[in-house]
Amino acid sequence: MKKLLPALAMTWALIGCQTANSSVETTNAELPPLPPLTEPTIETYPECELLEHWFHPADYREVVEVDHPNKRIIVWYDDSDVPVYKSIAIFRNNQLKVIDLTHDQLLFHGSVTFPDASSAPSHS
């Protein structure tokens, strides 16, 4: 009897470990295609229209350093890859800061109305 219980337990354990022969394989052909990754273009950022007051964003190469639901920081580079301007947009309280990095000068810091607030990042 003492040997029967461990033997039954082992049998049930082995039965539970067996896999059925009818396993289902999923291939990539069966999966729906993923939508293409599209990064927003700089023209879709609401602060870019406002930046035209201080410089022409289209004349520079931009690098988005921070892009959160509440804040976006962009550094603007000239043709020599030298950072020239920096913009910091705070969407929660409609603040914009524009910095001239060449002359180490704050060009603007204040409240603004973003032209198209729906373009602000909406990460959840």
Image: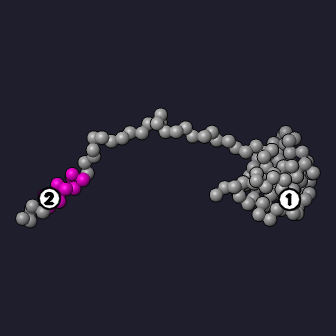
As drawn, the label of residue 8 is 2
- Name the image quarter holding the N terminus: bottom left
The x, y position of residue 55, in whole percent, is 91, 48
The amino acid marked with disc number 2 is: Leu
Task: Report the disc number at residue 113.
Answer: 1
Location of residue 2 (image quadrant) = bottom left
Residue at position x 80%, y 44% from top?
43
Q: Nearer the viewer, residue 61 or 113?
A: 113
As displayed, is residue 103 above or below residue 92?
Answer: above
Q: Is residue 50 visible?
A: yes
- Residue occupying the point 88% across, 63% down: 110
Q: How far apart are the two marked residues, 1 and 2, measured between alpha carbons?
A: 75 Å
Q: Quadrant of the C terminus?
A: bottom right
* Left or right, 94 with reference to 66: right
Question: Is residue 62 inside the magenta stretch?
Answer: no
First to last magenta residue range: 6-16
